[in-house]
Image: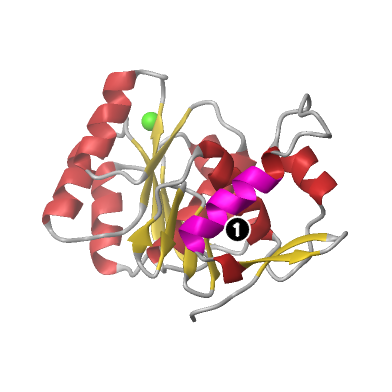
Amino acid sequence: MRVLVVEDEPELATRVAAALGDAGFAVDIAADGERADYLVRTEPYDAAVLDLGLPRRDGISLLHAWRERGITLPVLILTARSRWTEKEAGFGAGADDYLTKPFEMGEVVLRMKALVRRSHNVASPEIVCGALRLDTHSGRALLEGEVLDLTAQEWRLLGYLAHHSGQIVSRSELREHVWERDLDPDSNVIDVVVARLRRKIGRERIETLRGRGYRLVATGE
Ligand code: CA
């Protein structure tokens, strides 16, 4: 993956480029707005880091121009201050994400990876188990394409099972990972929530293994 770092502070540009390079990106640097515009129009970047305060042409106007031209390049903007108006302007112009200076180099890398992944529809935060899909980012569950109306407890339990789909999850594990610490061990809340979930997603999707726990199974693929 090839990325462009648009940043006029040479030391910062070098550090960002080095961090992205270490993470496996091919990196070009543009130190002013006109250069960035030229490179983006002529080179096939997979993503860009864009500082907003730039010589010759500011980041917001660049981003506007790219989006108007139909350039869908994922863009992470860098804002010098944690000012809401700057972020708002950035998103309004078509930014995909932002970071406020100063920031950790590791965070630029993580965010750029995520932007690139998303733009390629790879490794989305979606868990698929047969006809059941859980979007862990938006917090929605779908069965055969229909959004399920789940309570918070149902969502957490289903999410936990889905993260371990095909595996047996014990009741004590559910108690520890799905409920708050103070859940009474004798409470029947797990059975109640499992029963409610089964009514919503189909009995056959949550197996009971007597004395061992539950297992989410993939059916209806
Ligand atoms: Ca700057």
Q: Residue at x 60, y 58 (%)?
A: 21
Question: Does 178 appear in magenta?
Answer: no
Disc 1 residue type? Gly
* Corner quadrant of residue 118: bottom left
Give the camera-side residue of 85 and 127: 127
Extreme-right residue of the structure: 211
- The quarter of the image that holds ligand 1 is top left
The residue tagged 1 is 21
Q: Is 194 included in the stretch rendered in magenta? A: yes
Q: How many numbered callouts? A: 1
| Residue 58 visible in the picture | no
Return the x and y of residue 60 as percentages of the image width and height.
23, 37
- Identified at 41% across, 40% down, the residue is 7
Q: Is 200 in front, or is 77? A: 200
Left or right of 206: which side holds 79? Answer: left
Q: Which residues are magenta?
A: 191-201
Say above or below: 216 vs 153. Answer: below
| Image quarter of residue 87 | top left
Q: Is residue 115 above or below residue 62?
A: below
Camera sees residue 150: yes
Q: Tag 1's secondary structure? A: helix
Task: Tell me where residue 129 appears, x and y as whole percent.
Answer: 56, 70
Q: Is residue 195 above or below residue 87?
A: below
Front in this rendered view, residue 221 or 126:
221
Q: Residue at the location (76% across, 29% down)?
A: 183
Side of 63 relative to 118 (left or right): left
Q: Residues within 10 Å of mark 1 (few under 14, many from 20)?
A: some
Residue 32, percent from left and from top = 32, 42
